Amino acid sequence: MSLLGLHRSLRGALVGHFAAVKVTSSPASRRLAEALDRMGAGPAAVRFYTEHVEADPVHEQVVWHEVVAGLPTDEPWLDADVVFGIRATGHQEERLAARLLGTWRDGATAPRTGRIAPAVASRQGA
């Protein structure tokens, strides 16, 4: 998302990304609240996600009607970029899910390579 938000030329893709995230956030928040409750997490943690379950459908409507619907009216040449943002978000989510699920199926707890990113390594003096 930060790449899309940093470049004005990618604003159509950013709107598509944002819309895709808002549409899927309420069901995900419900699952997180239920999981946290099952695991005995504190009430503040459960409440945080429960509030998103209630608020996100309202935000979703605002995004669709005021942000996404307004863009083609104001800048119709960005339609394809909005679709790209939606599809790119789905693609990245699918890649992440496949990586996490594959790692867990293999009995590992995190999909780590054991390597430190170059920027982190240089800060650590490695």
Image (spheres, rainbow, N blue to C red):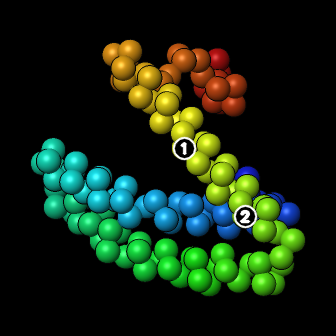
Can residue 24 be seen here? The reply is yes
Q: Amino acid at mark 2?
A: Val
Q: What's the distance in space between the residues labelled 2 and 1, CA to CA?
A: 17 Å
Picture quadrant where residue 57 is located: bottom left
Name the N-terminal-most of marks 2 and 1.
2
Question: In the visual, does 30 lie left or right of 97?
Answer: left
**Residue drawn at point x = 29 percent, y = 59 percent:** 30
Under circle 2, the secondary element is: helix
Q: Indicate which disc residue 9 carries.
A: none
Residue corresponding to mark 2: 82
At label 1, counting other C-alpha atoms closer than 10 Å, the crowd grade (few under 14, some 14-19, many 20 or more) is: few
Percent x, y of residue 49: 30, 62
User: Compared to 20, does 88 lie above or below?
Assistant: above
Picture quadrant where residue 66 is located: bottom right
The reply to whether discs 2 and 1 touch (Cβ–Cβ < 8 Å) is no
**Residue drawn at point x = 50 percent, y = 28 percent:** 99
Q: Indicate which disc residue 93 carries.
A: 1
**Residue drawn at point x = 67 percent, y = 80 percent:** 69
User: Compared to 89, does 12 lie above or below?
Assistant: below
Percent x, y of residue 93: 54, 44
Question: In the visual, does 117 lie left or right of 40?
Answer: right
In which quadrant will I find the C terminus? top right
Question: In the visual, does 20 lie left or right of 7?
Answer: left
Q: Nearer the viewer, residue 119 or 19?
A: 19
Can residue 14 be seen here? The reply is no
Q: Amino acid at mark 1?
A: Glu
Question: In the visual, does 123 lie left or right of 72?
Answer: left
Q: Nearer the viewer, residue 67 or 2?
A: 67
Under circle 1, the secondary element is: helix
User: Compared to 39, does 99 lie above or below?
Assistant: above
**Residue drawn at point x = 50 percent, y = 66 percent:** 22
Percent x, y of residue 34: 21, 54
